[in-house]
Image (cartoon, helix red, strand yellow):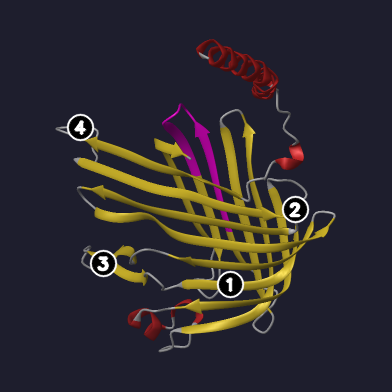
Amino acid sequence: MKAILFSCVTLLAYLSTHAQDPTVKQLKEATEKKINKDANDTIPALWKKGGLITLNLAQGSLTNWQGGGDKASFSAVAFSNLYAYYKNGKHAWDNTLDLGYGYVSTTSLGTRKSDDRIDLLSKYGYDLGKKFYLSTLLNFRTQFSEGYTYSKDGNGLDVKELTSDFMAPAYILLSLGIDYKPTSYFSLFVSPLTQRWTIVNNDVLSARGAFGVTPGEKSYNELGSFLSASFNKEIATNVSYKSRLDLFSNYKRDPGNVDVFWTNVLTMKVNKFLNANIGLDLLYDDNAIGRVQLRQILGIGFSTKF
């Protein structure tokens, strides 16, 4: 009886082992099989985000220096260029935020501001084909803190006069138009229908009628046409150039008198953490001072790109 039972168990074990051989072989082949990825199965990234943050520093001191000059000086300028681009089918949404702030401090002149900006641009477009987009554009510009002009009075003493502040002025522009994007680094937006608000949220400046507001009022709006051209490209190895030109014409108040906002930044990469930067801004707004305004900054400092 034991011999029969042993024979049955041995037979079942033998049959079970051989029955599993095909299954084991198939599993082994499946694990070793190379999987070819179809490009159509890849889900493209909808958002492209990044930016550049830079800090420029300079310091100097003089002791018994017969050549003359301030005993001590220090300057610091920080700025950032941030972006977030969205693309999904025929829908495109471009967002940029430029921030800048800087101070210069000397023994004789004290501390004065050298840079101050907040510039937000958001543009949504629907692809019409042939590189044209039906687009809406929103732009917001102001500054962080109070700004002054400096002069001397009749006694030779320093006098400073308040000329600007946070939200004084602030510009809000809303526009509907056509955006032409022939390349990834250039776009041209043209609009015949644009509303622009100028805000002067400072009692002193408002009472003065600064930036075109009626004295005592805090804002006014304009209807007009608008053009915005943007360029952002690495023009040489480790050298990039970013520029934006905005033109606005008021339909009611002297349409031929065009307001200009033109900002430029040339960045030259020294190494992973050091950059040389040249910035040049040109503004013209007859509601402000009626003359061309220029701001130029040259600096070498620490930077990080992400």
Q: Earlier in the sequence, mark 4 or mark 2?
A: 4
Q: Looking at the picture, how far across and down is residue 246, in whole percent?
A: 63, 62
- As helix, strand or loop, the secondary structure at mark 2 comes to loop
**Mark 2 Cα-neighbour bin, 10 Å: few <14, some 14–19, many ≥20:** some
Pointers 3 and 1 in contact (C-beta within 8 Å): no
Q: Mark 4 points at which residue?
A: 66
Where residue 162 appears, as percent x and y from the top left, is 33, 71
Which label was assigned to residue 181? 2
Identify the disc placed on residue 159: 3
Is disc 1 surrounded by few (<14), some (14 to 19) or many (20+) residues within 10 Å?
Answer: many
- Is 272 part of what is drawn in magenta? yes
Residue holding disc 1: 173
Cα distance between the residues tagged 1 and 4: 53 Å
Disc 4, SS: loop
Q: Distance between the residues labelled 3 and 2?
A: 49 Å
289 vs 76, left or right, is: right
Number of the front mark, 1 or 4:
1
The first of marks 4 and 3 along the sequence is 4
In terms of depth relative to the viewer, which is nearer, 217 or 66?
Answer: 217
Q: Could one spot residue 300 in this view of the protein? A: no
Q: Residue at x 33, y 67 (%)?
A: 146
Image: magenta residue range: 262-278
Question: Along the polypeptide, which appears first: circle 3 or circle 2?
Answer: 3
Quadrant in which residue 164 is drawn: bottom left
Amino acid residing under circle 4: Gln
Find the residue positioned furthest to the right.
Answer: 130
